[in-house]
Image: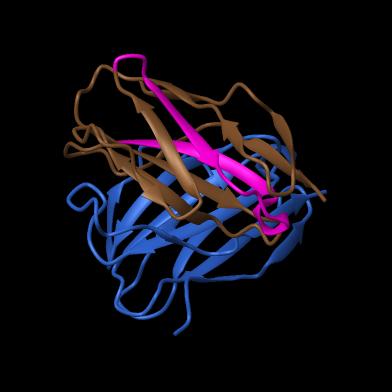
């Protein structure tokens, strides 16, 4: 009964490279949320996706960041041309129903990917 | 915009004692949800307890309980009989219950240390 799986657990990239972070939601969950945690900060919402659709990307930086959740396979958070300020822990969470509709459908978080940009 | 404030960056408590973690929030909405999450060194975010704003009764989960003061916009977490496994970062979070609000708003966290 696997939970939310994120990989890699740690990722090191040089400035200007691309970072790809993967998230496999819990079995049966079709709603995925990405959060970013900067050092000494709480988690900040980035984007909400449902299979093949971006529903809410209000927390996503306008440039260099993109997310997808294809029909088959994991959700991907992609950061192009990384900069030092992108260094953070990136968390994925999933739920069986949209958070906006269901209080009783809790979020299940993964263990996060720690991105370090050198 | 909603904000969540945790004014205690770090708290320390003796094992078996009781500790209270503070959280205040700012919102103009009347219907919302509040949560406490625990983040141990493994980094995983674990839901500890949750509260619906329209419920006056404070939520309780075993050794964890909240003191929800809606008028004061306060949502503190009380941990009774503290155990070594309670050591972690604790985050307070808010979520508007209406449509169009998909993300949780988190505070900056309180680092809880349990002294053996």
When the figure is inspected, residue A5 is found, relative to residue A39, above or below; the finding is below
For the point 76% across and 52% down, the residue is: A116
The answer to which of A75 and B51 lies nearer the viewer is B51
Using the rendered image of the protein, determine whether residue A80 is visible from the camera's viewpoint. Answer: no
Residue B36 place in picture, x, y as percent = 47, 43
Name the colour assigned to chain B in the rendering.
brown
For the point 70% across and 45% down, the residue is: A87
Taking the image as shown, residue A66 lies to the left or right of residue A69, namely right
Residue A85 place in picture, x, y as percent = 69, 37
- Asked whether residue A62 is drawn in magenta, I would say no
Q: Which chain is blue?
A: A
When the figure is inspected, residue A20 is found, relative to residue B80, above or below; the finding is below
Residue B8 place in picture, x, y as percent = 65, 25
Q: Quadrant of the N terminus of chain B?
A: top left
For the point 19% across and 33% down, the residue is: B54
Magenta region: B71-95
Q: How is the image coloured?
A: by chain
Give the quadrant of residue B96. top left
């Amino acid at each position: 009964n696997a939970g939310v799986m994120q990989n890699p657990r740690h990722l090191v990239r040089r400035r200007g490279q691309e970072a790809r972070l993967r998230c496999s939601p819990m079995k049966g969950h079709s709603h995925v949320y990405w959060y970013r945690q900067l050092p000494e900060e709480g988690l900040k919402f980035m984007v909400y996706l449902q299979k093949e659709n971006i529903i809410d990307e209000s927390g996503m930086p306008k440039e260099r960041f993109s997310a997808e959740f294809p029909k088959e396979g994991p959700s991907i958070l992609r950061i192009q041309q990384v900069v030092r300020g992108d260094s953070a822990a990136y968390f994925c969470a999933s739920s069986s129903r949209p958070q906006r509709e269901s209080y009783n459908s809790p979020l299940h978080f993964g263990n996060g990917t720690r991105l370090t940009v050198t | 915009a909603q904000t969540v404030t945790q004014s205690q960056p770090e708290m320390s408590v003796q094992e078996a004692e009781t500790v209270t973690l503070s959280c205040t929030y700012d919102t103009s909405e009347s219907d919302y949800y509040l949560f406490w999450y625990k983040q141990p060194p493994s980094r995983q975010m674990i839901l500890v307890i949750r509260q619906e704003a329209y419920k006056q009764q404070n939520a309780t989960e075993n050794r964890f309980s909240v003191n929800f003061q809606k008028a004061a916009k306060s949502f503190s977490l009380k941990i009774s009989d503290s155990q070594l496994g309670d050591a972690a970062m604790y985050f307070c979070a808010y979520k508007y219950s209406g449509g169009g609000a998909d993300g949780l708003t988190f505070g900056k966290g309180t680092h809880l240390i349990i002294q053996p």
